[in-house]
Image (cartoon, rainbow, N blue to C red):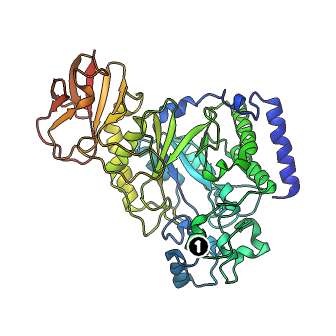
Amino acid sequence: MTEKQMNDYLLQIDEVIKNGKYKDEWESLAEYPVAKWYKEAKLGIFIHWGIYSVPAFLSEWYCRMMYYKGNPCRWHHVLKYGKKFNYRDFIPMFKAEKFNADEWAEFIKSSGAKFVMPVGEHHDGFKMYDSDLNEWTSVNMGPKRDILGELKAACEKTGIIFSTSSHRAEHFWFLNGGSTLGIKNETQDEKYREFYGECRNIHKRNNLFTMLKQEHGIEPTEEWLKDWLVSSCDLIDRYQPSSLFFDWWVSYKAFRPYMKKFLAYYYNRSLEWGKEVCVYYKSDAVMYNCAIFDRERGQLENISPYIWQGETSTAYNAWSYCTTNHFKKPEIVACNLLDVISKNGCFVLNLGPKADGTFCAEEKHIISELGKWTKQNEEAIWGTQPYKVFGEGKKQKGGSFTEHFSYTSKDYRFTCKTGVVYAFALKPAGKDRFRIKSLADTMDLFHCVIKNVSVLGTGESVDFSQNGKYLSLKLSKEITGTMPICFKIEVD
């Protein structure tokens, strides 16, 4: 990005805010309403795809780990590619030769998802879209295609709402291992500074400990903060996404004034475009009611008064496709979705395509099973709201990175709409009798008259009775499947 490009864009940003309804102040930004489409969406698809999909080893953090001694990624890299092979050398290998945006759109739609959120730029600094701000884009090299542009057109054609994400903030320090590796590499070559980023580092040693310390103690420069703001505004101006996701480093206090400017700019632009937009953030990057709070690989302990977002991946260990991935079972994904929406959240599931643009068999299976299940239970998912309590069963710990949680046969999640309570049994396999404590006839929470109970999707009538301890449900035979089942409880 040239100095002139940056200054011209900064003037444009200030002009839009000056003349717009929303100002770069929390009080003003809090007036922007939550997008109606998002409140109704319930399910979205995240996509991590980029240069890191070529080595496809351990995780999408490959470009960071390959420059640090003592970790499996470095060992793998040296053995397979050699010490002189740099991250940039993967770009010609990223061809996306089988990428078909229309096929992707149909695949995403089959899951039941209402919006898609492909990564626009990950921590590695490679843009998956067209931009004049630097040359390191998928249009200029690698696939030589506008990935975001093609996917936006295909998804919107099928009725899927288009969103994207930016992880550029972290690029400031992400590849800093090269500075202490002790071996000559491109991360320190000014010729490639725009690609590798500032590589800011405060550590002198290169080992697992300093790799895991990540950004601790590093402060972004004013120049980088301006770069982040301009890059973010350029992204939304080019593609007019209905929402934008930011990763965690924007929660550092130095970003505060720049985040306010971005939100004001985006919200004002949305009025010009005639569409409702959202921004997703982590930690306290944004003040309450000014954007959508996001929780990564975790959950809340209870129902939130404000809509929020819970995101996870099909794989436990990575967000991108890796040959080392350990994938979740479809029933786990369905339970994750139910836990989030029962607490007034929107669930986002990530997919990681292969470098050639195809999806692996495991993800195809997950999406196929999830799609059939959401179709069968759509009445209890969309057009519903949280019940008085989110559910019952084993207590979960709230927080991020707390998803390694085993649901039991006593776990239920609820949603509701006028005249109906939907009770999902999360682990129904092998059972024909179910007891729900939250719907006992002496519970202070529940005084409705139950008119009828049936299994959603099949319409099977369910025998029921209530006492002071629980609502008892009896099926004609044991459940053989592993996906959660839903009891439609009609009340008066």
Q: Compared with residue 437, is residue 406 higher up or lower down, i.e. above or below?
A: below
Query: Mark 1 = which residue?
Result: 93
Left or right, residue 4 beside residue 104: right
* Residue 347 drawn at (x, y percent): 46, 42
Residue 139 in view (yes/no)? no
Identify the residue at horizontal 81%, vertical 58% (top origin).
Answer: 1
The quarter of the picture where residue 66 lies is bottom right
Q: Nearer the viewer, residue 242 or 488?
A: 488
Left or right position of 466 against 132: left
The residue lying at 64 percent from left, 32 percent from top is 275
Pinpoint residue 260: horizontal percent, then vertical percent.
73, 39
Residue 204, image x, y percentages = 68, 75
Residue drawn at (71%, 77%) of the image? 186
Q: Nearer the viewer, residue 448 or 150?
A: 448
The correct choice, above or below, for 94 with respect to 243 in the image is below
Q: Locate residue 128, reporting x and y percent.
A: 63, 57
Label 1 neighbourhood size at 10 Å, few (<14), some (14-19), many (20+)?
Answer: some
Residue 460 in view (yes/no): yes
| Figure check: 227 above or below 462 | below
Q: How many marks?
A: 1
Residue sitting nearer the eye, 264 or 258: 258
Residue sitting at the far left: 476
> Looking at numbered disc 1 in the image, what kind of residue is underneath it?
Met
Q: Residue at x 30, y 43 (%)?
A: 394
| Secondary structure beneath label 1 | helix
Is residue 104 found left or right of 251 in the rendered image? left
Q: Please state if 232 lies on the left or on the right of 355 as rendered.
A: right
Height in image: 17 above or below 218?
above
